[in-house]
Image (tube, coloured by chain):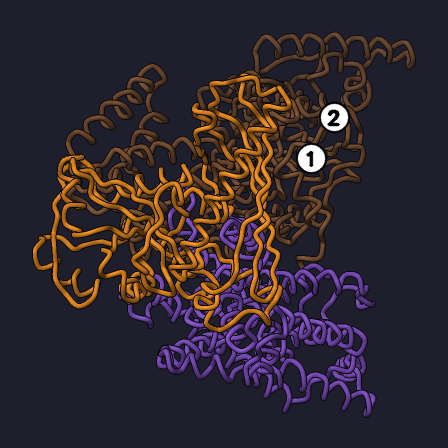
């Protein structure tokens, strides 16, 4: 299986996968450790990841997966998607469906994802486009809260740090989970020449400012002590906004975010399909059905507060390994050995 | 030279061949002095006066030809061989006075004769020379090019297609006076032998789509062909999709606008409907009115129409979801009103909505079938009387009537009848989902709908272009109506080629 | 529409609701909760204890209004029987109109909660009492220190001053004085606040733009007269504001959020126990006033 991507499509895929489910939750944990420095910590981490992106763009041809690393990544992505599902279901049950059995919810939204992934790959590539109007809607909702923001909450920086202050840096990397898909998808680009630095910068500043908006709004809207109690600050902000046509914007946002996350799952499934079905395999549809079924059933057993808390605290290390350390390692090893993507494709064809 | 045909016998045989049909005319005539001939035609398909006129012309001509021959060859005798030559050369050249009539001569062949006569031609069989003269002056019944009732517009051309090849082609040619406009013909149906034809503009046309059309037309293996629906089923990429993948129109101006964008229009002799492809979802939302109206006005109404898509599909579902699951999203004052209104109703919102929706659908279906004079009465009885009575009887809440009426109106905004019906059907699954899962159901339904739309293609071209594949620059063409003077470049509907590599 | 008042007894709002459920044939739905009234006595403890349940439940709206009432709660609810409206909506409109006239600082359940958790600012909620004729009357603002009601209140005029100082003007903010034995009313058009912070001293540099809305002596185009009036207003308002500040300090309630400014720009002066520190600081208002409009008369 193979696809062709334009630059725009690549960035759209990346954007959805990188924002995905993390967007509603990660502010809380950074702020918990970094306090008012969260914004600065996030910006520093984003600079590091921007450098990584530039590095990836320069060396992406050395990113060759052998069967071992392939398996590692497939397991990691499956795990990631499972966490997605757990978290989505948890949020849905606590915000909207306290009574519906979780397995029903999971079955419904995973079957949609399944339908999307057995469709032609272009569907999965392009489906993110429908989110763009929702993004604007979300931004409008967020800007409605401006009168209630306290700009002074952002300051002072680097004052009164806690012992776990440095953990803020680590948790800030949550925002960039999924950065590895850039190197995975890079070879499918239509014109395989360089992506200009300007486009990379544009994409990255968009992503960063989108996250920064959520962090700074959370900081400005809540008081520091309060935000530590609120696991989904963005949802909570919208929960407390009232406009003339609707009283609870959070419900709308939950669904915007739900569609967002579903698209992210579909996109992860696409990346996994691309890696897994690079070789021709039998019964691709059945294999995908089994994949989604396993994920759904596993997730259903793990929808508990304690599990989520654990994941929230420790998933980030897995993230760092797979988005940052492993791709760089693979690239270096292959550079030393001199293996590149194009050579590999030539030899296999 | 074969053995000469026996006149009486041949007439008998022909009558038998045409099963003694009441409108089949076969009779003996004489052309010139010697030649014996049989005239046959379906009286229902030709104008008798025309036949007589043609016959007279033919006689005069053969006389003329004979005199010419006499003077050239100085030979008084005419044998059949020479008449054959005349038939081949002299007659057709000179007889073509009337543009609508073509005359050709060819060897007599019984099977072909049947075909020709069925096509409305008048055939003269020359007994001695074993030849037949075809006079094509078929006069099939059809209406005049009036504005189609299903696609009325306010300003612009008020012509519509008819059930006739020549008239239709002339309606198109009138608008595109260029030899690049190509019309190709195919025969459909082994038994019915219907003419289908397609138009495109050479150089502009999407060649791959053209290949697809030609391939699919050639693959049609039908014995009986009698409606345009058969054709569209054969040409569709996904027959089971609720969305039409070819644009149906009876308006020449719409066809012209589309083929100038590189699309292909397919028509048959049987109906005034043209199928246009490859189209996108948004083609169904454009009407010639947009381009005849002022730029801002056209843009506004185009946006309204796209909004109508959303309200026609989602409004009842949204309402059901709110009143049965998410009451708290309503602002306080409205919430109180809605609640007190709904508390009176014995049924669940879904049932309430179904009662109203089914009533509306019945009224619509009834008013399509009823004669025009009664149609309006039914509209009033259905709309006002039932609407009012159903509320006072306490079956349906006032708000539900508003919602359903608004939805019904929205669904009729679409300028295309097919999409209109699809949309009205689509809102039922959404209503079910909303009553089961609230907004969650709607989101899931929307997802399925979007994935389906993304999977769709029209003549192997992406159906949801330019949103998918995403072309930000093309977007404004859908939502806005650009001023005409700016369109200096030839507009093409399918610049993206990237999407389709499956 | 008929309104029924149900009372319940319990250890928490949720428990009370449970108890009240026993007395009605329907389920109580809090999704259209519009006002939360808390009695003076309850508010003297930590009021968050009463509110936690509302924040935890996604279905309860956290944009409701919040008010402290004097005395017993019951008469405040009985009014819905006479007024043909639910008490909740009545108090919501009531408080909204107070906000529009800048008599109280606009808070919703959520924004109030953010302040409760914030140690650099304290709450000041509408304070209602029952009038003699059985109508609820606004009696200024109830001052909080930390999460508890201090027991001291500001009267309505002081409430307006607090709003001006806090830059939280509603739709119309008017103040009246007697100037040379005739009334003068001005409407605040625009306010600006600048804090001059040092270790134990804060000077609030306040600028006001005024519009005269009542001034029977007329002739404001006269420069001398206008300057004179300006001078008078400056002194009067400054004096009133300083009194408000003094009251706040006595109540150890930083309702103006001065602490935010101190914390953000001078974090070393910001003490953990801000309320105590606030009450001992030397805080003064320096005002300058300008009349920019005189209505459609001169």
Q: Which residue is mark 2?
A: B176
Mark 1 packing: few (<14 Cα in 10 Å), some, or many (20+)? many
- Which chain comes out brown in the rendered image? B
- Distance from the alpha carbon under mark 1 to that under mark 2: 10 Å
Q: Quadrant of residue B357?
A: top left
Q: Which chain identifier belongs to the purple chain?
A: A
Of residues B241 and C144, the one drawn nearer to the viewer in this rendering = C144
Question: Where residue B492 sits: x, y (%)?
Answer: 73, 41
x and y percent of residue B162 in the render? 56, 23
User: Quick one: SS at disc 2?
Assistant: loop
- Please name the residue shown 15% across and 31% down the image: B393
Give the chain ID for the orange colour. C
For this view, does A312 lie left or right of residue A125?
left
Q: Quadrant of residue B187?
A: top right
Q: What residue did someone put label 1 on?
A: B259
* Residue B338 rendering spot, x and y as whole percentages: 26, 40
Tag 1 near tag 2, CB within 8 Å: yes
What mark, if any, has residue B20 been given in the picture? none
């Amino acid at each position: 299986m193979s696809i062709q991507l334009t630059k725009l499509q690549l960035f759209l895929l990346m954007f959805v996968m990188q924002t995905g489910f993390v967007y509603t939750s990660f502010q809380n944990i950074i702020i918990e450790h970094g306090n008012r420095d969260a914004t600065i910590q996030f910006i520093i981490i984003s600079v590091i990841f921007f450098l990584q992106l530039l590095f990836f763009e320069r060396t992406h041809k050395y990113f060759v997966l052998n069967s071992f690393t392939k398996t590692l990544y497939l397991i990691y992505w499956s795990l990631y998607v499972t966490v997605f599902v757990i978290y989505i279901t948890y949020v849905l049950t606590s915000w909207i469906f306290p009574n519906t059995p979780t397995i029903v919810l999971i079955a419904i939204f995973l079957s949609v994802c399944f339908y999307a992934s057995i469709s032609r790959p272009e569907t999965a590539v392009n489906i993110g486009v429908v989110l763009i109007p929702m993004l604007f809607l979300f931004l409008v909702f967020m800007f409605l809260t401006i009168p209630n923001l306290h700009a002074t909450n952002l300051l002072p920086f680097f004052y009164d740090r806690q012992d776990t202050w440095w953990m803020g840096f680590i948790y800030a990397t949550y925002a960039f989970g999924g950065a590895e898909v850039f190197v995975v998808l890079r070879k499918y680009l239509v014109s395989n020449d360089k992506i200009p630095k300007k486009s990379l910068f544009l994409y990255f500043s968009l992503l960063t400012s989108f996250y920064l908006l959520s962090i700074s709004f959370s900081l400005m809207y809540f008081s520091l002590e309060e935000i530590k109690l609120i696991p989904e600050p963005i949802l909570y902000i919208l929960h407390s906004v009232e406009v003339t046509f609707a009283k609870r914007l959070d419900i709308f946002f939950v669904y915007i975010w739900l569609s967002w996350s579903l698209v992210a799952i579909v996109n992860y499934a696409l990346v996994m399909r691309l890696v897994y079905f690079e070789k021709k395999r039998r019964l691709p549809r059945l294999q995908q059905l089994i994949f989604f079924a396993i994920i759904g059933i596993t997730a259903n057993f793990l929808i508990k507060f304690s599990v989520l808390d654990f994941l929230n605290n420790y998933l980030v290390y897995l993230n760092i390994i797979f988005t940052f350390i492993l791709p760089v390692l693979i690239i270096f090893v292959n550079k030393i050995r001199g293996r590149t993507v194009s050579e590999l494709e030539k030899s296999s064809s | 030279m074969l053995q000469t045909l026996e006149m009486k016998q041949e007439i008998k045989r022909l009558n038998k061949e045409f099963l003694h049909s009441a409108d089949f005319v076969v009779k003996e005539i004489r052309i010139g002095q010697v030649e014996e001939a049989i005239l046959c035609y379906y009286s229902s398909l030709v104008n008798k006066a025309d036949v007589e006129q043609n016959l007279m012309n033919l006689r005069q001509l053969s006389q003329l030809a004979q005199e010419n021959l006499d003077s050239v060859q100085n030979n008084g005798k005419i044998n059949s061989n020479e008449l054959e030559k005349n038939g081949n050369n002299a007659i057709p050249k000179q007889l073509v006075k009337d543009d609508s009539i073509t005359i050709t001569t060819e060897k007599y062949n019984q099977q072909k004769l049947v075909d020709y006569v069925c096509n409305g031609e008048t055939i003269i069989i020359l007994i001695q020379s074993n030849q037949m003269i075809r006079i094509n002056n078929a006069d099939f019944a059809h209406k005049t090019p009036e504005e189609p009732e299903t696609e009325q517009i306010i300003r612009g051309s008020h012509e519509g297609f008819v059930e006739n090849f020549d008239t239709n082609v002339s309606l198109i040619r009138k608008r595109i006076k260029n030899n690049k406009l190509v019309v190709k013909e195919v025969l459909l149906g082994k038994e019915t032998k219907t003419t289908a034809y397609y138009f495109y503009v050479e150089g502009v046309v999407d060649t791959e789509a053209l290949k697809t059309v030609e391939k699919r037309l050639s693959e049609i293996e039908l014995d009986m062909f009698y409606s345009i629906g058969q054709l569209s089923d054969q040409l569709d990429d996904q027959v089971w999709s609720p969305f039409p993948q070819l644009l149906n129109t009876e308006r020449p101006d719409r066809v012209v606008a589309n083929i100038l964008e590189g699309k292909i229009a397919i028509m048959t002799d049987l109906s005034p409907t043209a199928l246009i492809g490859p189209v996108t979802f948004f083609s169904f939302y454009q009407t010639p009115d947009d381009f005849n109206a002022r730029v801002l006005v056209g843009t506004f109404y185009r946006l309204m129409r796209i909004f109508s898509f959303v309200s026609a599909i989602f409004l009842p579902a949204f309402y059901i979801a709110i009143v049965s699951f998410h009451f708290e999203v309503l602002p306080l004052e409205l919430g109180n009103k809605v609640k007190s209104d709904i508390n009176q109703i014995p049924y669940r919102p879904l049932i309430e909505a179904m009662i109203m929706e089914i009533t509306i659908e019945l009224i619509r279906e009834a008013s399509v079938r009823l004669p025009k004079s009664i149609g309006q009465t039914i509209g009033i009885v259905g709309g006002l009387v039932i609407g009012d009575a159903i509320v006072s009887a306490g079956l349906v809440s006032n708000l539900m009537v508003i919602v359903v009426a608004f939805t019904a109106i929205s669904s009729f905004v679409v300028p295309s009848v097919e999409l209109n019906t699809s949309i009205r059907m689509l809102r039922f699954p959404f209503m079910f989902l909303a009553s089961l899962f609230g907004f969650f159901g709607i989101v899931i339904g929307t997802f399925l709908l979007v994935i389906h739309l993304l999977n769709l293609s029209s003549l192997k071209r992406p159906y949801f272009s330019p949103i998918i594949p995403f072309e930000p620059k093309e977007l404004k063409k859908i939502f806005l109506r650009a001023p005409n003077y700016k369109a200096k470049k030839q507009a093409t509907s399918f610049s993206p080629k990237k999407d389709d590599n499956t | 529409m008929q309104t029924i008042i149900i009372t319940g007894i319990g250890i928490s709002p949720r428990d009370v609701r449970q108890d009240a459920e026993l007395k009605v044939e329907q389920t109580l739905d809090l999704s259209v909760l519009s006002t939360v009234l808390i009695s003076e006595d309850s508010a003297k403890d930590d009021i968050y204890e009463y509110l936690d349940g509302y924040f935890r439940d996604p279905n309860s709206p956290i944009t409701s209004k919040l008010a402290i009432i004097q005395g017993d709660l019951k008469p405040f609810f009985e009014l819905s029987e006479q007024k043909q409206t639910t008490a909740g909506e009545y108090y919501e409109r009531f408080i909204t109109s107070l906000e529009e006239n800048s008599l109280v600082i606009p808070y919703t359940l959520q924004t109030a909660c953010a302040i409760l958790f914030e140690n650099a600012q304290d709450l000041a909620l509408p304070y209602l009492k029952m009038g003699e004729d059985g109508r609820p009357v606004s009696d200024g603002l109830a001052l909080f220190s930390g999460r508890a009601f201090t027991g001291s209140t500001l009267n309505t005029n002081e409430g307006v001053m607090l709003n001006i100082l806090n830059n939280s003007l509603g739709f119309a903010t008017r103040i009246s004085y007697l100037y040379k034995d005739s009334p003068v009313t001005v409407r605040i058009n625009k306010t600006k606040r600048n804090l001059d912070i040092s270790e134990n001293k804060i000077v609030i540099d306040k600028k006001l733009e005024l519009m005269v809305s009542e001034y029977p002596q007329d002739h404001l185009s006269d420069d001398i007269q206008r300057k004179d009036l300006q001078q008078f207003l400056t002194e009067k308002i400054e004096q009133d504001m300083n009194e408000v500040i003094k009251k706040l300090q006595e109540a150890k309630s930083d309702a103006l959020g001065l602490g935010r400014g101190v914390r953000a720009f001078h974090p070393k002066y910001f003490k953990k126990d801000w309320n105590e520190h606030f009450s001992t600081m030397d805080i003064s208002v320096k005002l300058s006033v300008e009349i920019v409009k005189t209505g459609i008369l001169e």
